[in-house]
Image (cartoon, rainbow, N blue to C red):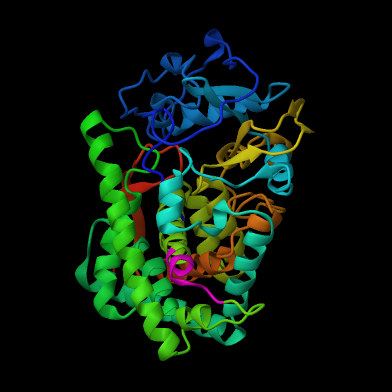
Amino acid sequence: MTIPSQGPAQDPDVGPGVGSAAGPPVGPDREKRKAGADRTGADRSGADPTGADLAGAGLADPAFWQAPPAVRLAAFARLRALDSPVYVPEGRGRGHWALVRHADVQEASRLPKVFASAPGVTTPEPARWVRALFGDSMVNLDGPDHAQLRRIVQRAFTPRLLAETERDIDAVAARIVDDMLAARPDEFVTAVSSRLPLEVICNMMGIPERFRAEIADRVNHASENIGVERGITARLRMPGRGLRALARMQRMVAGIGRDRRRHPTGDLISALVCANVDGQALGARQLGAFFSLLMVAGVETTRNAITHGLALLTDHPDQRDLLVSDFEAYADGAVDEMVRHSTPIIQFRRTVVGEHALGGRTFLPGEKVVLYYASANRDEEVFGPDPDAFDITRSPNPHLGFGGGGPHFCLGAHLARQEMKALFRELLTRPRDLRAVGLPDLAGSNFDNRVRSLKFTFTQ
C-alpha cells in the first residue's frame, strides 16, 4: 500500500490530482449547524464546540477532522439528507464529490469499471515516482492486474495456513493478557491492542523475531501522519521519514522473500514467492507492496477497532454485561458492531472512468469521488433512526467497515474478526473490572479513525 503523507487540506500542492469537471463548493448552510461534543462533552481540539466554526469548512478542512466526533457525525447526517452528493474543493481547482450514503458507497464499490481505484485510493494520490519505486499495492489496482495479484494472494492462504493462524491467534491473545496481568500497564494501545495484529501477521508471514521490533517501529513511522494536519516544518520532513520507513521495511521483507524462494518453510511469504498461478508468483516489489498493505492496513485498522471496542464497552456497560453473560453467543455481533461504530478506515478515493448516474447526480470521466465509509455506517436508511447507538445485538448489520463489496472487499476481514474475538474473550474473562479511563487520544486523521493512546485499568 502506498502510504499518503497527509490529507488534502493540509498541503494541496502535494500529489497529483485531476480536478472535478463540474461543481462549486456546496455544503450545508452555516445557520443550520448544531451543537456537538465528544462523549464527555469536551472539545479538546480548540474548535468551537457548537460547531459554528465548521459551518463552511467542508470535508477537506483540518478543523472538521479535529472537531469532536459528535460534530462530525451531525455534519455527515446533514449531508446524507441532501438530494445529491456535495462537491468538496481541495485547492487549486481540484476537489471531489462526497458519497456519504450507504447505498451510494456500496454501488460505487461494486462498479470498478466506472469508479476506478487507480491511480490511487488515498488522498493525495501516490505520485508516479512513488508507485515506480515501491510498486502498486493491490488497493490501487483494477481489472486484470488486480485480479491476478488477488488470485496469487488468495491461493497462498491455504486451509492449513488458515487453521494454523487461527490457533496462533488464540495463543497470542492469551500471552498478551498474561503479560498485561503481570506488568499491569496503564496504556492500552502499546501494551495490548497493537501487539495482537502485529504478532499474528508476523507469525503468519514467517518474519524472524529479530526483525519484529524494527518492523513495528517502521509501521508507526510510515502511518503516524496519514491524513493529519501538521505545520510546515513537519510537512517538509515527515513525508521523507515515512517513505524511508516504508523502503526499509520493504527491503527487509524482500530479503526474506529471496531466502524463502531457495528454502521455503511453509509460511505465507514462502507461499507467495513460490506460488504458481498462471506461471506467476510475487516478485520482490509485489511482495513488498503486499507486506506494506498487510502491516499498515491490517495492523493499524485492527488495533484501532480493538481500542475503540474497549472504549465502547466502557461507555455502554449494559452492552458489556450482555456480552459477558454469554460471550460465544454475542461475540460475532459485538465485533461487527465495534467495526461499524468505529469504522477504522474513514474513506477511500475513486476516479470516475465512465459516465454514470448515482445518488441524484451524473458523474463524468475524470472526476474524483470519495467513499465516506464513516458516514455510510451511520446511514439512517439502513441502521434505523438512531444509528449512533451501540447495539451488539444489531441484526442485520450490513456495515461497510471492510469495504462496500466488489473486488476490493477486505481480504483480511475474517482474520480481523478472529483476532478481535480472541482478544476480547481473554480480556473479559480473566481480568476484572477492565475499562478505559478517560478519552481515547485520537489522531484527528481524515483517513483512518486512529487512536494514539488510551488509558485503562483493571483488577485481578
Is residue 378 covered in magenta? no
Instruction: Report the side of 266 relative to 172 (left or right).
Output: right
Secondary structure character of the magenta stretch overall: helix
Give the left or right position of residue 230, taking residue 79 as reference: left
Given residues 338 and 110, the one toward you in this image is 110
Q: Residue at x 55, y 23 (%)?
A: 88
Give percent across and percent down for residue 22: 65, 19
Q: Indicate the position of residue 451 as horizontal and vertical percent values.
A: 36, 47
Q: Which residue is depicted at the point 48% across and 30% down?
A: 70
Extreme top residue here? 31
Question: Residue 236: image x %, image y %?
Answer: 25, 36
Kindly indicate the quadrant of the structure image that contains residue 239: top left
Q: Nearer the viewer, residue 341 or 116?
A: 116
Relative to 427, say whether 88 is above or below: above
Camera-side residue of 414 and 247 = 247
In the picture, which quadrant includes the C terminus? bottom left
What's the residue at 32%, 59% (across, down)?
A: 247
Residue 448, visible in the rendered structure: no
Q: Residue at x 73, y 36 (%)?
A: 381
Residue 75 visible? The answer is yes
Q: How many marks?
A: 0
Query: What stretch of residues is rendered in magenta?
Result: 281-288
The answer to whether 359 appears left or right of 187 in the picture is right
The answer to whether residue 390 is above or below residue 419 is above
Which residue sits furthest right? 357
Q: Is residue 311 left or right of residue 153?
A: left
Q: Is residue 312 above or below residue 458?
A: above
Residue 368 quadrant:
top right
Residue 205, image x and y in percent?
43, 77
